[in-house]
Amino acid sequence: MRHVYSSSSSADLSADLLAVLVPTGAVAAALGELDAAAYFGGALAKLAADEEFTGKAGQSLAVPGLGRISPRRVLILGVGGGTDAEVALAAGTAGNEARKRGAKHVVLSFRAMANPTVRSALEAFAEGNYRFDKYKAEASRKAAVEQVSLLGAGEDAHTLALAEAGIAGQNLARDLVNEQPAECHPQSLAKVAEGLANDRITVTVLDEVAIKEKGMGGIYGVGQGSERPPRFVHARYEPKGHCKAHVAIIGKGVTFDSGGLSLKPNDGMLTMRCDMAGAAAVIGTLKALSAIQPNVRVDVIFGAVENMPSGNSYKLGDILKMYNGKTVEVHNTDAEGRLVLADCLTYASQLKPDVVIDLATLTGAAVVALGDWYSALYTRSDELNEQLQTAATGAHEAVWRMPLPDLYKDKLKADWGDLKNVGGRAGGSITAALFLSEFVTVEKWAHIDIAGPAFMDSPLMHFAPGGTGTMVRTLTRWIERLGE
Ligand code: BES
Ligand code: MN
Ligand code: ZN
């Protein structure tokens, strides 16, 4: 997908789809240029009035070109007050429409907007346009967008570069999540990270022997029931110039979560290829950062494992010795993510970064609490909370802060080990976060449970069902800001 700035008249551009973004109260101004074309002769303004189109966010109006103007189809989209979220909603709709129609050339017109949020718009367009159809018959696949032309968006190459970096990172994350678990497994995920190595990025991978030798009992224990051995991955992005901050981002990389011996029922297991969405998000973020090149050192860490039942699986009652020396009594092999993350958190803490953030499809309880749109954010730092909220808003994603009360820590007390790996049904997402906190030694840490937003079971807004690449844009924006 190529992005180009254009200054042509919107009626003259030969496009499959022309999407016009219209703020509230600017209908006449937004449609004026098109309406002046002979074909419309003022009818567009009347149509908008008849259809009660006022430019409110979420409104849309489709008009066929019928060969009388160059664009084949016109989509008029309300953007309300023009916030990032409102523009993203409209641009995502345009992306979705382009996908359904198989449009190759799309024009996005920002001419009616005073301060167009071009980056958000392009990211959302790509988000709505995304498809994963590699396993569909060739003949049934729609054409992909080749070019997006921007009208009234200024001429800023940097904005395009930022948007394109975010899109590439998010799409990589979505592709990784959507890939079938037969193809996406610990070794393949490690290979993807290795493929991102360049003059700023170094990648280290530990195999199952090294994982065991190092004493990463959480990752090793979860992975031991699978024919596919686990991998531990550490990629470091090091800026060439001065370094303004040092952060570590961690992802849960369970490439398939069957539940292990605590086997999941069929319906709960069906979409568990999504359980590496945290790892996919940090890999996607690394890809975006390698293009944006912020002045921040970023350690990207994930444990990649398959959680399977077998004669060699870890068992209920097993006591795992974790990388930081603590012992964990296994009460449920389906609470595997926290065991994998725990070792990653210990490793990350040893690097002594300013901040550690982990992303994980950790609990069904987070989905029950917040649904598909909000990720559950846990942090003791008000400052980090604010930074992440701001980054998420700019990225038109959503994190919702949850409590992290010491009061519930007793629920993790075990009879024989230092901790057990489950804290009961009540507050399941909170006790999972408290479990993780036992493995963090840096002061600033955030845990983001992305179990809801990482994967859509049915379409939501402009998202197709499947992986969403959630948090790639939020993390990217957050790191960019740290480097300024
Ligand atoms: N990967 C799941 C959590 C999950 C559920 C992610 C739904 C995405 C959608 C996790 O490993 C898990 O199985 N968690 C258990 C924990 C329980 C056994 C304490 C859960 O949430 O039921
Ligand atoms: Mn599980
Ligand atoms: Zn899991």
Image (cartoon, rainbow, N blue to C red):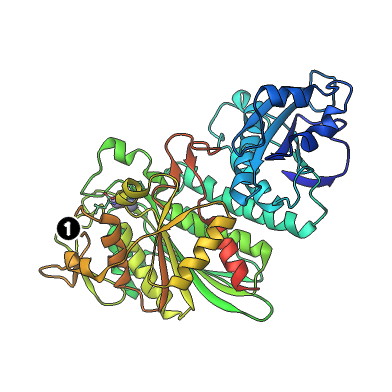
- Is residue 11 found left or right of 455 in the rendered image? right
Residue 379 location (% of width, % of height): 39, 68
Which SS class for mark 1? loop
- Is residue 167 found left or right of 405 in the rendered image? right
Quadrant housing the C terminus: bottom right
Inspect this view and state whether residue 194 appears.
no
Q: Quadrant of residue 395?
A: bottom right
List the residue tagged with mark 1: 331
Q: Quadrant of residue 417?
A: bottom left
Residue 132 location (% of width, % of height): 55, 37
Q: Is 395 above or below relative to 78?
A: below
Front residue of 416/205: it is: 416
Front residue of 465/156: it is: 156
Q: Could you classify mark 1 by the number of other residues whose Cα lies within 10 Å: few (under 14), some (14-19), or many (20 or more)?
A: some
Q: Is 125 above or below relative to 343?
A: above
The number of callouts visible is 1
- Residue at 34% in and 69% down: 343
Front residue of 193/336: it is: 336
- Residue at 55% in and 29% down: 136
